[in-house]
Image: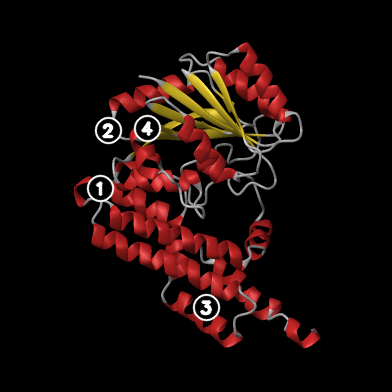
Amino acid sequence: MTVSVALCTYNGANYLELQLESILNQTVVPDEVVVSDDGSDDGTLELVRDYAQQYPETIRVLDEEKNLGVTKNFEHAIEACEGELIALADQDDYWHEEKLERQIEAYEQTDAELICHDSYLVSNNNVMTNHADATLWSSIRGRHNPLTATDPKRAVSELLERNFVQGATILVSSKLVDQALPIPDCANHDYYLAILAALTNGIYDMDARLLNYRQHSDQDIGVSRSPLQKLTKEISIEAEEYGRRACFWKEVLSLVQSLESDIMTVDREWLVERLSQRHSYSESRQTIRNRSTPMMERISTFGQNVMMRRYVQFGHPAMILTDLFMLLFIGTPIDSHLHS
């Protein structure tokens, strides 16, 4: 069984060499490593090309002249992969040497088309963090239980709330990739692949930590934050981001409606209803965060979210406070036309 690695880079020269070495020193060496650079200007591309010269039979470099962004860069790399299985890789992580071997074994022993696992949280210097939640799944609110993925309905329900599948841990079949591409512009590639897998052939969650996940302050998951920091970060999310999320759930809804019933792992009618609710929740939060929307409409939308318990179903009760803060203290902008 042939295995490709899709590695995306962007200004990652400080960490990339360690990651490349960890990939090339796997107990099962990949048949190819496809590197897609997204317009780096810090020496990343030169470093990758040096490695490609050392390993011409293994490493292929895709050089993008324009910046694609994370999702489309991964799509570009994945499309170029020729393996039957494709492992996704971030530029600044560190793979444990048995990662690929164990994931391939899991793929061969299950019916799942997507295999993922837990990660150790490490500092910028690749040193294990010393806080209590030293693994990715432990750091997720409510803590992720890998047994969830064995029940398709539970897996889908959790994915409707949050993405527990870290992109850098994904090993996916080319069969699933063919179903997924092209990935919608408003989607996160890992989230989209995870949902498609859960809806069709299933996800297998390995209860194992097979890579070191390097922590940066701008990451959404894994970073240890105080409750106040979490609230502040949530308040900072703009209406445009909730618009992107609403677009994502609309695309997932379209995907579900296009799938044949005999390949789905959950009831379509139940899923369409839940996805419609999830889409409405993201749209409503876009309305609440949009300061150009009349205040009464924003307040009414907020009240509907509270009454319908959407914050509990698809987010967290604390998000009630963040949206209330937005309504009470951010207010509406002065109409720019008054000053034109």
Q: Which mark is residue 174?
A: 4
Q: Is residue 315 left or right of residue 15?
A: left
Q: Residues within 10 Å of mark 2 (few under 14, many from 20)?
A: few
Q: Residues within 10 Å of mark 1 (few under 14, many from 20)?
A: some
Q: Which residue is mark 3?
A: 302
Mark 4 burial class by Cα count in 10 Å: few <14, some 14-19, many 20+: many
The C terminus: image quadrant: bottom right
Q: Nearer the viewer, mark 4 or mark 1?
A: 4
Task: Kindly tell me whether residue 234 is visible in this rendering.
Answer: yes
Q: Position of residue 245 (x, y in %)?
A: 51, 60
The answer to whether 162 appears left or right of 215 in the picture is left
**Residue kind at label 1, given as amino acid type:** Thr
Q: Residue furthest right?
A: 339
Q: Amino acid at mark 2?
A: Asp
- Which of the two discs, 3 and 2, sits closer to the camera? 2
Circle nearer the N terminus (3, 2): 2
